[in-house]
Image (cartoon, rainbow, N blue to C red):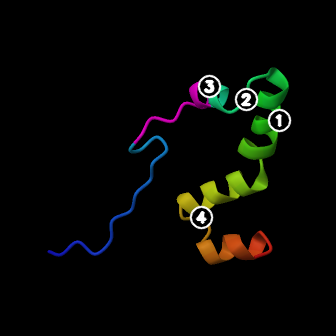
Amino acid sequence: MRIKNIIFDIGNVILHFDLEKVLPHFAKTEVERNFLIQEVVHSPEWLLYSLVDTGFLSRQQAIAIDGG
């Protein structure tokens, strides 16, 4: 048997991803923290790419939805 593809998924697969531990490195104030959570973590793009990660959407479908 020959390995054809290797898929890497870093967040919570290879490395532990804990938003509460990572966020303070990027946001010093509560306002900055809330902004990052709302505008990045809860953004359509972040959520959309989780649909790509799970195979629900293809990369091409995600690009089309995102206007690319």
What range is drawn magenta here?
15-22
Q: Which residue is mark 3?
A: 20
Residue at image position (45%, 48%) is 10
Characterize the local packing of mark 3: few (<14), some (14-19) or many (20 or more) Cα atoms within 10 angstroms. few
Q: Which residue is mark 2?
A: 27
Q: Amino acid at mark 2?
A: Ala
Q: Please state the horizontal and vertical placement of residue 42, each as a whole percent of the image.
A: 76, 44
Q: Please state the horizontal and vertical placement of residue 51, each as a whole percent of the image.
A: 62, 59
Q: Amino acid at mark 3?
A: Glu
Q: Which residue is mark 1?
A: 35
- Label 3 to label 4, Cα distance in Å? 27 Å
- Label 4 to label 2, Cα distance in Å? 32 Å
Q: Of tags 2 and 1, which is closer to the observer?
A: 2
SS state under label 4 = loop
- Label 3 to label 1, Cα distance in Å? 14 Å
**Nearer-N-terminus badge (3/1):** 3
User: Is 19 left, or right, of 47 in this rendering?
Assistant: left
User: Is 22 left, or right, of 64 in this rendering?
Assistant: left
Q: Which quarter shows the N terminus? A: bottom left
Characterize the local packing of mark 1: few (<14), some (14-19) or many (20 or more) Cα atoms within 10 angstroms. some
Q: Which residue is mark 4?
A: 56
Q: Of tags 4 and 2, which is closer to the observer?
A: 2
- Label 2 to label 1, Cα distance in Å? 9 Å
User: Is 50 left, or right, of 36 in this rendering?
Assistant: left
Q: Please state the horizontal and vertical placement of residue 37, each as a whole percent of the image.
A: 75, 36
